[in-house]
Amino acid sequence: MTSIASPSEAAWPVGRKRIAHRAIPTHAGTWGANQRVTVTVHDQDHPVSLPWGDEFEITDEIYRFKNWQPEKVHVLMSLNMAKTKLKKPYHVPIAWVKNYGDGKVLHMSLGHREDVWTNEKYQQSLLGGIKWMLGLEPGDATPNPELSSAQEAKAKADSDTAQS
């Protein structure tokens, strides 16, 4: 399990392959720790995203990823640009999974604030992810790059509309 809080993973070449991005997070022009955002759940059946329903609002720190590789991951949740105050013209995944060798990888961007860690849905989400990685719960990890492409196009449209 990885989070944006562990940038050393992304600095390691094997780690970059495992997590499918190079996380050099920046706060400039992104959503700081006190930003309320709306997250869309794309795979409502996966144990990681199941607790959240189809959409939720949360206050947390959100990052954009450098060298994002959507063709290698199954995106579970993304920032909803249409319903988020700071609109940017790109897809911002929040949680994704992938198979890696004989193992499984979960990346969750949430969890920068204490109130997120104490959120029951967040705890259920992490527990679901652990059970999925251990093979105790089923969940799809088939890459879904078409979702990222569609979300990117939607984010650009939402950003353009906001700037008009």
Image: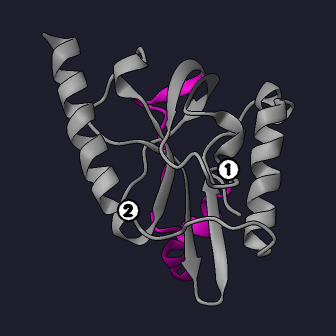
Which one is in front in this view, the residue at disc 2 or the one at disc 1? 2
Q: Secondary structure at mark 2?
A: loop
Secondary structure beneath disc 1? loop
Judged left or right of residue 32, residue 121 is: right
Classify the position of the N terminus by image quarter: bottom right
The residue type indicated by label 1 comes to Ala
Report whether 114 appears left or right of 87: right
In the displayed structure, 48 sits above or below 37; it is: below
Residue 100, relative to residue 138: is it above or below? below
Q: Kindly report the distance in space between the C-alpha atoms of the residues bearing marks 2 and 1.
A: 25 Å
Q: Nearer the viewer, residue 14 or 119?
A: 119
Numbered label tally: 2
Q: Which residue is mark 2?
A: 144
Q: Position of residue 82 (x, y in %)?
A: 34, 21
If the image is split into quadrants, where does the C terminus sit? top left
Residue shown at 53% from the left, 69% from the top: 141
Quarter-of-image position of residue 113: top right
Residue density around tag 2, few if under 14, some if 14–19, many if 20 or more, within 10 Å? some
Residue shown at 67% from the left, 82% from the top: 103
Q: Which mark is residue 91?
A: none
Q: Earlier in the sequence, mark 2 or mark 1?
A: 1
Q: Identify which residue, 132 or 10, lies in the foreground.
A: 132
Q: Nearer the viewer, residue 86 or 10?
A: 86
Looking at the picture, how far across and down is residue 33, in whole percent? 62, 25
Using the rendered image of the protein, determine whether residue 90 is visible from the camera's viewpoint. Answer: yes
Q: Residue at x 37, y 59 (%)?
A: 68
Q: Give the amino acid at mark 2.
A: Asn
**Residue appearing at x 67%, y 45% in the figure:** 50
Instruction: State which quadrant residue 102 falls in.
Output: bottom right
Mark 1 lies on residue = 5
Task: Return the residue found at the far left.
Answer: 164
**Magenta-colored span:** 6-33
